[in-house]
Amino acid sequence: MDKDVNKLVNRLEEEFQNFKKDLKETTNLKELEKLKVNYLGKKSLITTTLKNIGSLPNDLKPVVGKNTNIYRKKIQASLDQKVEFFESLEFDKKLRKEKIDLSLPGKKPELGSKNIITQVIEEIEEIFIGMGFKIAEGPEVELDYYNFEALNTPEDHPARSLHDTFFISDDVLLRTHTSPMQVRYMEKYQPPINIIVPGKVYRRDYDVSHTPMFTQIEGLVVDKDINFKHLKWTLETVARKIFGRDRRVRFRPHYFPFTEPSAEMDVSCKICDGKGCRVCSGSGWLEILGAGMVDPNVYKFVGYDPDEFTGFAFGIGIERICMLKYGINDLRAFFENDMRFIRQF
Amino acid sequence: MKITLNWLKDFLKIKELNEEEVADLLTMSGTEVKKSEDVGARFKDIVIGQVNEFSSHPNADKLSVCKVNVGDNILNIVCGASNFKKNDIVPVALPGSKVGDLKIRRSKIRGQVSEGMMCSEAELGLSSDSEGIMILDGNYKIGKSFAKSAGLDDVIMELEITPNRPDCLSIIGIARELSALKDIELNIPDYNYSLEKENNFNIEIKDYNLCPRYSAKIFSNVPRIESPQWLKNRLIFCDVRPSDLIVDLTNYVMLETGQPLHAFDKDLLHSDKIIVRRAKKGEKIRTIDDNNRDLNPEMLVIADEGKAVAIAGIMGGKQTEINQNTKNFLLESANFNGPSIMRTSKKLGLRSEASNRFEKQIDPYLTIFAIKRFQVLLERITGHKENAKIYDNFKKTKRNRNIVLRSSKIRQVLGEDIKVGVASEILSGLQIDNKVKGKNLEANIPSFRYEDLEREVDLVEEVARIYGFNKFGSEPPAAKQSMGGYSFYQKKIRQLRDSLRDIGLAEVINYSFISQENFDKFNLGEEEEFNKLVKIINPINEDFQYLRSILLPAMFKTLEDNVKYKTSDIAIFEVSKVFEKSGKKLPIEKNKLGILLSGRKEQKSWDNGVEYYDFYDLKGMLEYIVEKFYPNKDLKIKAKEYKFFHPTIGGLANIDGIDLGIIGKVHPSICRGLDIEQDVYYLEINLDNFIKNIKGFKNFMPIPRYPSIEMDIAIVVDINIKHDDIVQLIKESGTGILKNIRLFDVYQGKQIEEGKKSMAYSLTFRREDKTLKDREVEIEIKRILSNLSKKFNAKLRE
């Protein structure tokens, strides 16, 4: 009995080896179909063996059935695998016929843009926020009191002639700088104060280098023990963040009625690296902001004790920063809103 | 203001001043040097020559050939002028030099060699017009540099003088600064002579507040000669046009001392008395610039017993002006009230070198020195000695003060320990007397700094600026528990801008102004919401007459301008304030967002046709913003007519009763009137309302656990039935299982009865507690259709 079984297993094994050989030689689905008929079809060894199982002695039936089925499954699995293989080959062939011109233009959503002035304001805001500053905003139409008087610039002060002013009435005007918010903010809050104030300002001046409206960022820091060295550190840090770490920075004494001492800050010219060129009119330096220690007279207007509190204030001209940073040479371009300008940024 | 280095040296005990060093010292101490020019370089290789002989050019009638001795050489020069004689001394430009823009080189002119050029004053830039070669006097030595001999080897510096330093509007003031900065001794002459001769002259000052001091001196029988070249040169260098010696000297002394002077022809004054008084009502004067000026009692004038002869501190009168025949003149050296001069100058629209100084309030103690300086220079130039008395009407007021400067204050303000001894030296250098007392010092402020040094902190600044701002370090402020950041409002504005950029819009910034013309063109006068304009009382021109109440006209202008540049597809936004007159002093300021669309949304491309912006593109953008900031709210547009919108395409936008603003199609007549052929869509929302109501916090919505069923229905209704109303009815007809209604097709045309339209909706149903059965949806649809049929006579489209 064992002998018969062994014989059968050997035959099945032989059949399987033949199948494997034939399978290797098939090159397409059609041939594969033929192979399937040969090895699993009605006349195949496996099918006939299983068909004849009924005529075998009872004790042999399970052994023969089990062994034959093992081989049937093995063959079936190999066939399935091969089918999948040929199918994927065929699919690949089909895909390879699908060609597009990859160089045709894409279907691009239109690119929008935030105004360059907005972008630079936001950049500067972020720098100051990182230093713990809040952002305050104030009215563009202002009282003379906030724009001048409380900023230590009474009527008939010679400095007023530097601010050509648009008037709404005798004592109402378009703010000529963002500084009025210094007074408004101090009226409302007590130190410590750390604010910047971005916004539009207006001067009655319209030529190649002046527009009747432009943009400033004011800054105010007031607390106990704030001194000029803190002003220097804060503004140097900001300038280097905006213009690059390798820029040199210097402070020149200047005059503003509401700060004492007052200063202007220059950064070394990026174009010539401080050697002097057309952009910096040969000086090697570019003026970027005005600043100073808050004048004690201003504290009197808001009821702070000048012996207790000190502070500094500064004003940055945004268009100027944009021009220096991006190499824009015409101030008026900012408000002409030519799409060829606007959409560059 | 301009100065020259040589002039500066006149008042300093120093031989040489280095251009770069002076520029740096002044700039870094608060007197910014805007520009610096070495004038000597202009005259490089121009030397003094002598015409040895000359003969006419063999080949040209109008030219002559000269032999010119330039010291080490005799040059052959062809010349076109004919005003010179043998042995005349002339400036000669050698080959390699530049005369104006002309480069001089050795050349042949009509066959004759020419080795240089003899120059005229005009060619050298020394006068605006001159004929012939400049003939020099015997003081010029042959072969020497022309620039040096003529006092032209100088450096001009243009300075920015801040308004707090009227004392620096003078050569002497700058010399004083430099003396402190470089530790050079000052060299200011002390004119201590007394003058005796009485002229029986009288000065009456009616208002000492407006004129604290009036000094004057009469000069008689002054020889009239031309100003020497050196004096003219210095005036030219400082942008003052030379004219007559007397006038030139008044200007020269003003530039030098900062004290404006004025000379009247004494014989044209109608009295031996000068009266300083307010102008009479209706009084007029013709000023030396040949303009008639209307005066009023706010203005101060200098008058004789007849009438006004000068506007005090601003400009002299034509009638008493120095002229060719002037023999005797009255020299005025006065002091006026700064604010009064400023007001008058502003009122008359007339500024002068004098008013520029007076309006900043100058030192009354300058008047006598300036007269004496004038006299010394006049004597030096003309030899004329004048022993007449100086008349001086002066109401003295306190002009000095003591200020204590504590070293603790220096430390508090600057953060730097500057020793009191150092501070004391700095102040002494600035001619401010002071005494050190322990850790403090007491300074006595001189008259010439009386206006600007009032308080301790002013002295801190003086010390700091001379010490040098860059000499002391920088330090971060002590760390504080201070929370920086954007407010909620600011954060939302920033997000809004980003969102608008992300959908392809470009941000513009326009001026905040509107003209009457534009106001009218957009028919704003008839719109309650937009017609309360804030008026500018002193606009630059008609474009700046009012503050804008709406962004539309300016944004429309942006469209117009860009169409001119052939960019006619416009999708822009602007975030800006608008202004509205209120009952109070300050107008109402509202923050607005404007969006304007016009032209092609999509250009014709290889896979698509052209698409133009329409109303629904604009509405879609608004929906996008609303969805972003109000996730579960619906945008509603209520039709409303605006004069600037198309009569039926325009309305008010709101969400849940919150008014956002306006949206519509710009009225085609307005577009046509402004030469815009394409459709324009515009919306403007009130950001204050929009942002105020945003919830800062989004609640989590559970994700549905059971599947939904989608059903499409298409109905045919009358053309006038609104989508909003249909949706409303569907919503009301459905139960809780109806979750979403989406319109996906609108059709009008052949397949539909005229006057009707087909609307196709996709309805989504879902239960939260279990899987929905088809039967439940069928019942729902049936009810909806039945209601639609009842209310709108809607028929199901097969």
Image: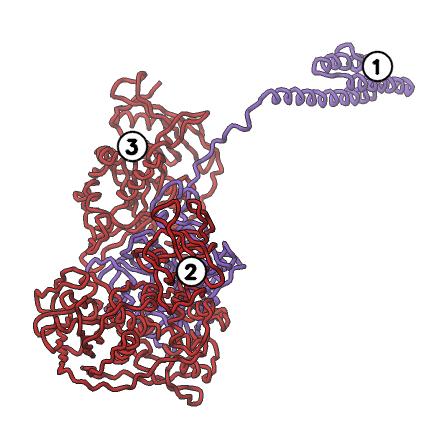
Chain colours: A purple, B red
Q: Position of residue B314 (x, y in %)?
A: 21, 67
Chain containing mark 1? A
Chain of the residue under the numbered disc 2 shown in the image: B
| Residue to which mark 2 is pinned | B43
The residue carrying pointer 3 sits among few (fewer than 14), some (14 to 19) or many (20 or more) residues within 10 Å by Cα, namely: some
Q: From the viewer's perspective, is B335 left or right of B460?
A: left
In which quadrant of the rendered view does residue A37 lie?
top right
**Residue at the spot of label 1:** A56
Do the dots labelled 3 and 2 sit on one chain?
yes
User: Disc 3 residue type?
Assistant: Asp
Q: Secondary structure at mark 2?
A: loop
Q: Amino acid at mark 2?
A: Phe
Report the disc number at residue B679.
3
Tell me how far mark 3 sits from mark 2, CA to CA. Answer: 65 Å
User: Of helix, strand and loop, which one carries label 3?
Assistant: loop
Check the image and name the residue furthest to the bottom: B437
Q: Is residue B441 above or below residue B287?
A: below
Q: CA distance from mark 2 to mark 1?
A: 131 Å
Mark 1 lies on a secondary structure that is loop
Q: Which of the two discs, 2 and 1, sits closer to the camera? A: 2
Q: Nearer the viewer, mark 3 or mark 2?
A: 2
Q: Please, is residue B745 above or below residue B186 in the view?
A: above
Q: Position of residue A247 (x, y in %)?
A: 51, 60
